[in-house]
Amino acid sequence: MQRNAKPSTAEKAGVIALLLALLFSFLNPGLAVLPLSLFLLFCLAAPFVSGFGFFLPVISRGNPANRQVALTLDDGPSPSSTPILLDLLARHKLQATFFVVGEKAAAHPELIAAILARGHSIGNHSLRHDPFLMLRTPKTLQEDIHTTQEILKKYGVRPLVFRPPAGITNPRLRRVLARENLIAITYSCRAFDGGNRNVRDLAGRILRRLRPGHIIMLHDLPPQRQTSAGYWQKELDRLFAALKDNYQVVSLEEIIRQPVMMNELDGPHCQ
């Protein structure tokens, strides 16, 4: 898989900011700080915009020219949610990509096996889902992602896609992903459910935001309140039925037009 060696948006913006600062310094030295300050603000804000590849190429959606959408599920596997999701997906004959957390995958190999047996694909979602991962040292970031790759390799798969926790990126991530032969995948439609803490009208919140080409992000986590479990399943059932009625639900591989996982025995996994 070829990697993009072109300058990042951040690098190009930095050059432009320096050139503008130099130009402004000749006109009015006091103005020279303006483009540099704007660049700094962009650097601080851009990592929190999940679909904006400021520091590195990020894929967050597919081609909007058709009515295709893709399903992804984050933060699992979990014995309290993964089997339910697998049954619902099978009932609606839908495929998904599970972005799994390394430590959870190591604790529940039977769930990884079940995901693969149902024909779904798996992506790397970091080792512990550390919300501050992008603030850690380059060494810590490398070890986190690499360790997750090694855990999943034991199950015969090697993810080719990485989804950073909360969709946050940093300038160091580009080099780490290149070493691991990974690309960054985020999302373009989410319910802002707080990791299934708020499942009220989950289906409606997705469907109102959904557009052709979108990559949907849901959570492979049980609802925070046990009493909401039945309601959560009904919302997913309603969502999956509506997706089938109004869109062509395709695999993540199809919507981004490249494999997302290597089967160590058989090669690229394409649904």
Image (spheres, helix red, strand yellow):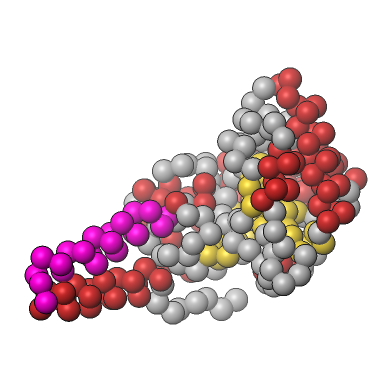
Rendered view: 219 above or below 144: above
Q: Quadrant of residue 195?
A: top right
Percent position (x, y) of residue 41? 31, 56
Q: Is residue 174 left or right of residue 79?
A: left
Please identify the quadrant where the C terminus is shown.
Answer: bottom right
The kind of secondary structure the magenta stretch mainly shows is: helix
Residue at 52% from the left image edge and 41% from the top image edge: 128
Front in this rendered view, residue 203 or 122: 203
State the image quarter where residue 24 is shown: bottom left
Residue, x 73% and y 24% (percent of image)?
228
Q: Is residue 46 magenta?
A: yes
Residue at the far top in the pictured view = 227
Whole-percent x and y of residue 171?
Answer: 38, 62
Quarter of the image that includes the N terminus: bottom right
The answer, for residue 249, to whether it is visible in the render is: yes
Point out the stretch of residues depicted in magenta.
Answer: 27-47
Q: What x and y, as percent, mark residue 110?
A: 75, 41
Q: Quadrant of residue 184?
A: bottom right
In the drawing, does residue 259 fall left or right of residue 241?
left
Say which residue appears at 78% left-offset and 40% top-offset.
236
x and y percentages locating residue 159 in the rendered image:
63, 60
Above or below 257: residue 185: above
Please tell me whether residue 23 belongs to the stretch shown in magenta: no
Residue located 34% across and 71% down the image: 13
Number of callouts: 0
